[in-house]
Amino acid sequence: MNAPRNRPPRGRFRARPDRHPPWCDRGRCTVKPDGIGAHISASTVLPPNEYDMVTVTVHLNQGVPLEGFPRTGTVSVGIELEVPA
Ligand SMILES: [Zn+2]
């Protein structure tokens, strides 16, 4: 019996753990030897200035691309805002 059409075959969901994008910070990367996880870049911090007291922290994130799901594995930008109380 075949798997349902909307499900890709099992065992084809993993990233190659030996390949990282050049921006990946290996200390923050969560891709494990089994290929599950996400690549994460180092954070860049934009400090507050005289006009704006908000601290902005930015990093890149890329989850494991899933074969058969073209919208997975895209790079996203994580943004954290720190506003003084
Ligand atoms: Zn990585």
Image (tube, rainbow, N blue to C red):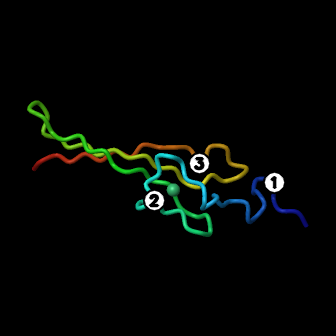
- In depth, the one of 43 and 11 nearer the eye is 43
Are the residues flagged by discs 1 and 2 in contact, CB closer than 8 Å?
A: no
Number of labels in the image equals 3
- In depth, the one of 47 and 78 nearer the eye is 47
Residue at position x 61%, y 64% in the image: 35
Provide residue 37's location: percent of width, then percent of height: 54, 62
The circle on residue 73 is: 3
| Amino acid, disc 1 | Arg
Provide residue 1's location: percent of width, then percent of height: 91, 67
Residue at mark 1 to residue at mark 2: CA–CA distance: 36 Å
Q: Which of marks 1 and 3 is nearer the N terminus?
A: 1
Question: Is 80 placed above or below 48 here?
Answer: below
**Can you tell me whether the CB of the residue at mark 2 lies under 8 Å from the nearest atom of ligand 1?**
yes
- Mark whose residue sits in front, 1 or 2: 2
The circle on residue 26 is: 2
Give the crowd class for mark 3: few <14, some 14-19, many >=20 residues within 10 Å. Answer: some
The circle on residue 5 is: 1
